[in-house]
Image (cartoon, helix red, strand yellow):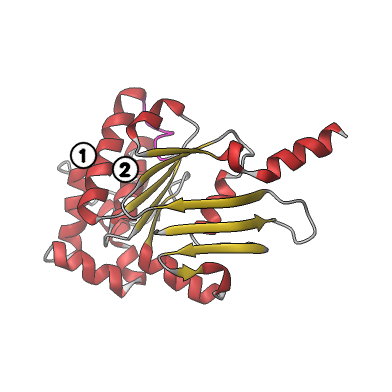
Amino acid sequence: MVIDIQDMVFRWDAGGPAVLALDALAIATGERIFIQGPSGSGKSSLLSLLAGVTTPQQGKVEVLGKRLDRLGSIERDHFRAHHIGYIFQMFNLIPYLSMVENVALPCRFSLRRRDKALVRSATLEEEAVRLLQHLDMAHPGLLHRPVTALSVGQQQRVAAARALMGSPEILIADEPTSSLDADRRESFIRLLFDECRQAQSTLVFVSHDAALEPLFDRSVNLARINRALAKAEWREDT
């Protein structure tokens, strides 16, 4: 398994209530998994744990054979840079960099991803352009424009290309189609699938849009498996 969670409990505040309590969650290598749930079901908390941004107060979070709950913050930062691509809901693009420079950015923080990118293309710029082409973003005149000159939908695809740069083993996508119209959503996901398949990346895709669910290998409803929600409902009723 590429991701293995067992008996895990997470709280944002040490003395506060649990926001995420999972008995078990396993994700296989190369799987394309759709995680859904309403606001407050723990989706953001789960992604934070999988990326090693936070650690649980109890239980196991194992990613690519590493117990993230046993690593220090610097070790988790290095692990994330080397192995995880992340499409942020708010994109987090660097405004003063061009599209190509933004896409190549992960290779400045990870020699591992730099080396993997250079296996696929002769230069980092060439690999960035290849990814942008696959996501229908390599139009003449666009490549070296600042990302602030792009539409919201275009920025979202640049963020996806950046996350895919250097073929990370895991791609985490946080509501990556929220700024795309209905006609573009499925085509974007198909392109994302193709690139993940070529890179042999496991895709963890979070969305509230249930219409996308049939496209994926498997779906997990976080509201159904998060025991912390049941406890919160019980507290409200009493």
Whole-percent x and y of residue 56? Answer: 63, 62
- Spatial CA distance of label 2 from label 1 is 8 Å
* Category of crowding for the residue at label 2, using alpha-carbon neighbours closer than 10 angstroms: few (below 14), some (14–19), many (at least 20): many
* Point 66% across, 63% down: residue: 58
Whether 93 is among the magenta residues is no
Picture quadrant of residue 163: bottom left
Q: Is residue 119 left or right of residue 87?
A: left
Q: Is residue 79 visible?
A: yes
Q: Identify the amino acid type marked 2.
A: Arg
Task: Determine the secondary structure under disc 1.
Answer: loop
* Category of crowding for the residue at label 1, using alpha-carbon neighbours closer than 10 angstroms: few (below 14), some (14–19), many (at least 20): some
Whole-percent x and y of residue 203? Answer: 36, 48
Which residue is denoted by mark 1 in the rendering? 136
Above/below status of 216 relative to 73? above
* Point 17% across, 45% down: residue: 133
Quarter the C terminus occupies: top right
Picture quadrant of residue 105: bottom left
* Point 43% across, 70% down: residue: 79
Q: Earlier in the sequence, mark 2 or mark 1?
A: 1
Whole-percent x and y of residue 74? Answer: 52, 76
Which residue is denoted by mark 2 in the rendering? 157
Dots 2, 1 in contact, CB < 8 A = yes
Which segment did they paint magenta? 176-181
Q: Identify the amino acid type marked 1.
A: Asp
> Along the line of sight, which residue is nearer the eye, 182 or 125?
182
